[in-house]
């Protein structure tokens, strides 16, 4: 399986609610970075699955019906670019989230060693904080 297919499988597992699939794909020393300007960027980089798991839990709590809708996968070998949209509703504000994202996945020997997110940080702020 090539890296783009592996990453696509991570999104498919997330859509099915199988969050352990992503956690199992993370290298023990993964460096996960959220987009600068979001409330989650303060922890950058999140190092290791034990840091990434709680982060993803916070996002799921902050955004009701949170989902990822990937649209394109660009295979660059050990680097995979995914473009798509985030969807959901701010848990506190009840405002809809429909924000574009770009995710850059860095892989080595079948494990995710780095992740970088880019997204519409203003929209995230409006949805989460009003």
Image (cartoon, rainbow, N blue to C red):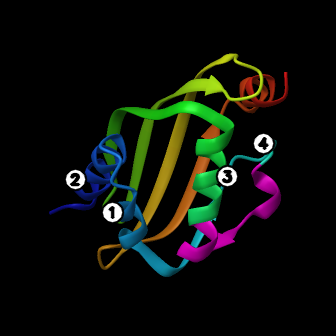
Q: In whole angstroms, how far apart are the C-alphas of marks 4 and 1?
A: 25 Å
Query: Which residue does the image show at 25% across and 52% down from the upper left?
Result: 9
Instruction: Reply yes or no: does residue 47 show up in magenta.
Output: yes
In the rendered view of the protein, which quadrant contains the C terminus?
Answer: top right
Identify the mark nearer the N-term, 3 or 2.
2
Q: What is the magenta range?
A: 40-52
Q: Nearer the viewer, mark 1 or mark 2?
A: 1
Identify the mark nearer the N-term, 4 or 2.
2
Q: Are marks 3 and 4 in contact (CB under 8 Å)?
A: yes
Q: Nearer the viewer, mark 4 or mark 1?
A: 1
Query: Is disc 2 placed on a helix, strand or loop?
Result: helix
Residue at the spot of label 2: 5
Q: In whole angstroms, how far apart are the C-alphas of marks 1 and 2?
A: 14 Å
Instruction: Reply yes or no: does residue 95 show up in magenta.
Output: no
In the rendered view of the protein, which quadrant contains the N terminus?
Answer: bottom left
Nearest to the observer: residue 115 or residue 87: 87
Nearest to the observer: residue 9 or residue 116: 9
Q: In whole angstroms, how far apart are the C-alphas of marks 3 and 4?
A: 7 Å
Query: Is disc 3 placed on a helix, strand or loop?
Result: loop
Query: Is disc 1 placed on a helix, strand or loop?
Result: helix
Q: Is residue 63 above or below residue 76?
A: above
Q: Are marks 4 and 2 in contact (CB under 8 Å)?
A: no
Query: Which residue does the image show at 36% across and 72% down from the upper left?
Result: 24
Report crowding for label 1: few under 14, some 14 to 19, many 20 or more residues within 10 A (C-alpha).
Answer: some
Residue 21's disc is: 1
Q: Nearer the viewer, mark 4 or mark 2?
A: 4
Residue 73 relative to residue 113: left or right: left
Of all residues shown, which one is farthest toward the left?
A: 1
Identify the mark nearer the N-term, 1 or 2.
2
Identify the mark nearer the N-term, 4 or 1.
1
Residue 66 relative to residue 120: left or right: left
């Amino acid at each position: 399986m090539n890296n783009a297919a592996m990453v696509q499988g991570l999104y498919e597992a997330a859509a099915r609610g199988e969050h352990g699939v992503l956690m199992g794909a993370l290298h023990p020393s993964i460096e996960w970075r959220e987009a600068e300007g979001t409330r989650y960027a303060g922890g950058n980089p999140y190092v290791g699955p034990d840091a990434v798991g709680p982060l993803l839990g916070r996002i799921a709590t902050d955004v009701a019906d949170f989902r990822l809708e990937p649209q394109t996968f660009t295979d660059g070998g050990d680097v995979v670019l995914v473009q798509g949209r985030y969807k959901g509703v701010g848990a506190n504000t009840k405002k809809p989230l429909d924000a574009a994202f770009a995710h850059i996945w860095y892989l080595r020997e079948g494990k995710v060693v780095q992740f970088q997110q880019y997204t519409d940080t203003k929209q995230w702020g409006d949805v989460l904080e009003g």
